[in-house]
Image (cartoon, rainbow, N blue to C red):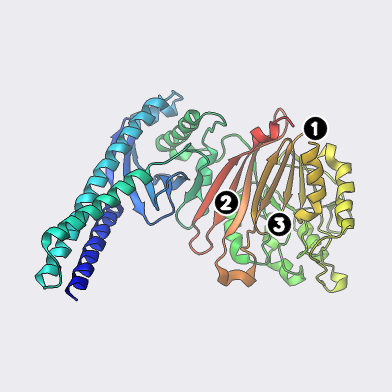
Amino acid sequence: MARLRRTIALLLVALAALTGTVGALALVTQEKTLSVGTIDVGVSPLHHGALDVYVPLVDWGARFAGVRAPARLTIEVRAVNRGAAETLARGHELDVNNVKAEATDAITSALRRLLLIALVAGIVLGVLVGAALKGVGQGTRLRWSILTAVVTSLAAVIATAVLIAPRGRIADPTYYAHGPDLPRALDALQSLKRSQTALDQDINGQLVGLARLVVSPGAQPELSGRPRFVLASDLHNNVLALPALQRATRGLPLIFDGDLTDKGTPLESSLIARVAKMGSPTVVVGGNHDSDTLLKDLAADGAIVLTQFGRLKPDGSHGPVVVKVGGLRMAGFTDPFLRRAGQDYEDKYRVGLTNAAVEEFRRWFETVESRVDVVVVHEPQVAAGVLEDLRRDPPDHPITILDAHTHRLFLQADPNLLEINGGTIGAGGTGNLTDNADYTLAIVTYRLQPTPLPLAVDQVTIDPGDGNASARRVRVDKQLRAKP
């Protein structure tokens, strides 16, 4: 029995030492001053491993993979040197290599101090618990408690030091923001001059954007000169998601790729009518949960409703098949299972599309391929045959195919072919509100000159509970321009 008590006592000492080590890492930060500003360096244990760089000034951050420990190495930009900011804002270059070297030395020094503090905290707490247990007659000899506390704390610190250092290339960040609004991160990102080839230039561009915000925050342009459009789909009557969609759109073209409703009845049409005026403009393609009634109502409310027969007019007639939206030539294909008022909005969707639907889309696409930059179709299976053809034999100019229906974000870039699925802005619809699913959408940045070309896609995820959002930016222009 005495041996069991001593074993339990040593386990409690080890647990206390580990708690002290982890607690110190979580609570203590180190402030470091660089030539361009001040940063705080800290460790957040019990998270998926990542390197987090957060800028409270503009309320956005970037999260990089590569940390193997179950913790995040966090770096917060607490202050920016105004002199350096003014120099950057006037267009002068920054010695990025020097700043990177400064930052590396500062972070290394801060981590050493953090680990030393954690080691001491773990040992002290472990020894105190050992002394307390001995004092009430439940412990073991104090030297064994001290040895246990030292070994446990030292092992935890060594493991942290080995595993917290990022491994591999620091690239492909996920951008995120806090607070109730859709990410101001995206607004900040659009003003940053990013490079597709050099990380140094990428960092320099971000610092230039931040510097200009510090020096003249009211004069920040929303965009950096590149046009964008928003891709959303699968609202399924979830009107609670409309404010988030409106904040994401804010003056941009909105391409809504089907399934605004569940059946497309007149009542549902009235619930989501404001979507028609949300974008500049709003473009809609019907999905299998939409109806002919809904599409006519949206057209009457000012939306550009695209069908394989041409732009739908409120009276049911059709205009041109290809329309210009945001400078891009665009055409759309209505889902073959669109519901009809004359059939009491009956659901005719079947798992597995008929070959006839796939062939109808292929024949239609052949008539517009040379005249379009963007094709919008709700059901990926409808376009599967064409996508396979284009991946095997790339088109002679970049074509983007926007699809939906799966409720999953998807992106694939091939030579002169880009497929994007924005997931679900309605988190699966009103029937799934208790599941706490995320809202998702995509924002596409592109160029128009010398020829239209998608440059990047921001895959956005929004927590419907608190509004926090993250955005992962994927550069696609290099893959699109690659030779087959």
Alpha carbon of mark 3 to alpha carbon of mark 1: how far?
33 Å
Between residues 119 and 24, which one lies in front from this camera angle?
119
How crowded is the residue under tag 1: few (<14 C-alpha within 10 Å), some, or many (20+)? few
**Which of the two labelled residues, at mark 1 and mark 2, occupies the earlier sequence position?**
1
User: Residue at coordinates 47% horizontally, 51% vertically from top-left?
Assistant: 177
Alpha carbon of mark 1 to alpha carbon of mark 2: how far?
30 Å
Q: Which mark is residue 396?
A: 1
**Which of the two labelled residues, at mark 3 and mark 1, occupies the earlier sequence position?**
3
User: Residue at coordinates 19% horizontally, 59% vertically from top-left?
Assistant: 125
User: Which of pointers 3 and 1 indicates the residue nearer the eye?
Assistant: 1
Name the residue tied to disc 2.
460
**Which of the two labelled residues, at mark 2 and mark 3, occupies the earlier sequence position?**
3
Alpha carbon of mark 2 to alpha carbon of mark 3: how far?
21 Å
Q: What residue type is labelled 3?
A: Ala
Q: In which quarter of the image is residue 152?
A: bottom left
Between residues 432 and 151, which one lies in front from this camera angle?
151
Q: Which quadrant, please, contains the C terminus?
A: top right
Between residues 123 and 464, which one lies in front from this camera angle?
123
Q: Which quadrant, please, contains the N terminus?
A: bottom left
User: Residue at coordinates 80% horizontally, 50% vertically from top-left?
Assistant: 383
